[in-house]
Image (spheres, grey):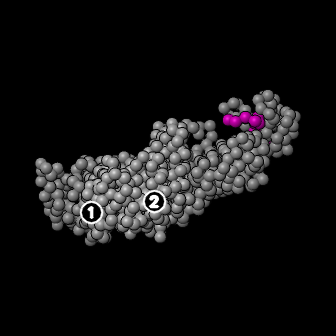
Amino acid sequence: MNRLERLLRPKSICVVGGGGFGTNVVKQTLKMAFPGDIWVVHPTKDSVEGVRAYKSVADLPGSPDATFIGVNRNLTIDVVRQLRERGAGGAVCFAAGFAETGSYDADGARLQDALIEAAGAMPVIGPNCYGLINYADGALLWPDQHGGARLAPGARGAAIITQSSNIACNLTMQTRGLPVAFLMTAGNQAQTGLAEMALGLIEDERVSCLGLHIEGFDSASGFEALAARARVLKKPIVAMKVGRSEQARAATVSHTASLAGSDAVSSAFLKRLGIARADTVPSFLETLKLLHAVGPLSGTRLSSMSCSGGEASVMADSAEGRSVFFPALTDAHKMRVSEALGPLVAVANPLDYNTYIWNNQPAMTATFGAMVSGGFDLNLLVLDFPRIDRCSDADWWPTVSAFDAALKAHDAKGAIVTSMAENIPEAHAEELLRRGIVPILGIAEAMDAVEAAAMIGRAWGREVSPPVAGGTARAVLAQQSPDEAQAKSMFAAFGLPVPTGRRAETVELAVAAASAIGYPVAVKALGLAHKSELGAVRLNLRDANAVQHAASDLAVLGHGLYVEAMVQHPVAELIVGIVHDPLFGPVMTVGSGGVLVELLQDSTTLLLPANRSDIEATLRGLKLFPLLDGFRGRPKADLAAAIDAIHSIGAFALADPGSIAELDINPLIVCAEGEGAFIADALLVTGGNP
């Protein structure tokens, strides 16, 4: 049995503390008509909201499955210990004042350690959290109002976990029609982390999909296990990961003492796992709704229909710059639509079907059927309902019924999209879901949801990525910075592609090295980072006289000279960087390189190990890629060699992941097809003995 089974799906609930929050838990549990036992522990009260109160945990008639602890932080530890001794199933610790207080309260961290010790193997959620709502069984450990409803017998819904109790409250108030089976808050994750909570929820057959509001990852391996299980169960996951800005990262640390982490690394990790990312609360909810109703999508080919040219234009523009698109109709497809719609309308995708067939259900059914027959990944109907307090919506339902019939006739997936969120009542959204049509509130949110669902579809269609390398302990005082000659010697020993080069201590030795290597050569001053900015590099030196002059100029800048063969027939320059992340281990960045790297901002982050297909997809996603692909008749680059080089650089970083603090290869020069790719310059910082 899952460690959290009794806590998540309790047959008995205990509330410790009869103050305002404890009383609210009892009140909300009774309101939800929880069918199991409800017990209250309070030292002075005989009852709370009509429920008998016991003086202590020891006096309870049995061992509670789930307990809400609503007393102060010091008493919380004693109660947790008593519950563990009674064999309780688990507890929610509401009190704040633990590790989230950071340096402001010296007792906070000590008390959190004491809480973990008191709990032992008994699951504890929090502290500093609101708890959970099980809408499937009517079980609440929740000290506040909530806007959700009991899940109907046999129904399924989304499970949502958030690290913010207030955001959790807000999510219960949504009127978008999304059915929710479970809502859970994580708090400090002192003992039970987000990944374990999610694993406990996703196994429930009443859960259709999972939504995570993440401030920080508690465990890379835990999330990998979660993603793998979600894939087996065919239950997609969408995450709203905060921490893009410095202010957001500071807020998350002060709020939950969790690691917000690098946003680029977080995105790479989620993508690797096949977990979609939403950036706003509305998009998060609409994506969950789409995943709940139709699951992941196999692609981003969309059809759109509306009775307005203006709406058709807005839909077309909304796809601009995105992976979603409205493919042009084939001649045969266009003919089918035209025959159903008549000669008065210009047939296109997005389609303005005009208002002359409005409220003509047979005509609309024929038109919609002809349109959705094209095998699109999702078919969209733009339909804003009138406000029912002042208007009648009777004429809108024939349109819904026509769309419903068309989708069913062609076994197609469909969504009704409102241009404004307020233009569909909650009951209407629920009715659409009952019919198998996804109600999506907002055009931008619809595009976000489709991209997310298609991302999961693509991820589930490819091979599972291996586990990330993981962070390692670092010896801060052991960092060293080998110069370029030393670094390239290490690279060559590992088999990485480096141009032929030699260290030279004097100008005369530099000239001799150039003659031995063969012209043209480059001469560099050693011991300097960012040599180009310091004028510490001379390129394309074609004779001994040029080398002598260059070496004389550079000898005074650094600590020795390095003479290197010039890379021939370059096509493009890449940057390949490695940094050490405390949670994920070595992390690679691949992007446009050279002196304009900061200006171009064209890069992607990869977690290691990365396979060749991941690396190729990364290169193809760069703005630079057309250069590699022979832009406007230019020579094509040796893409295979670039992929091999980047893959080998990743292997170099993984060979001793604790030793590399930072690696900056800029540029990795990619030559013409068949001529290789070479590490032209590199900055290496080691974290120990390499």
- Residue situated in front as seen by the camera: 237 or 600: 237
Q: Which residue is located at x 21 percent, y 58 percent?
A: 427
| Res 630 seen here | no
Tell whether position 528 is magenta. Answer: yes
Q: Position of residue 226 (x, y in %)?
A: 49, 62
Q: Position of residue 81 (x, y in %)?
A: 49, 56
- Looking at the picture, which amino acid does disc 1 mark? Ala
- Looking at the picture, which amino acid does disc 2 mark? Leu
Residue at the spot of label 2: 83
As drawn, 543 above or below 163: above
Residue 33 image label: 1
Residue 139 image label: none
Q: Position of residue 5 (x, y in %)?
A: 43, 66
Q: Is the magenta stretch mostly helix, strand or loop?
A: loop
Q: Which residue is located at x 14 percent, y 58 percent?
A: 395
Dot 1 or dot 2: first in sequence order is: 1
Provide the residue span drawn in magenta. 518-530
- Residue situated in front as seen by the camera: 350 or 418: 418
- Residue situated in front as seen by the camera: 189 or 307: 189
Quote the CA–CA distance across marks 1 and 2: 25 Å
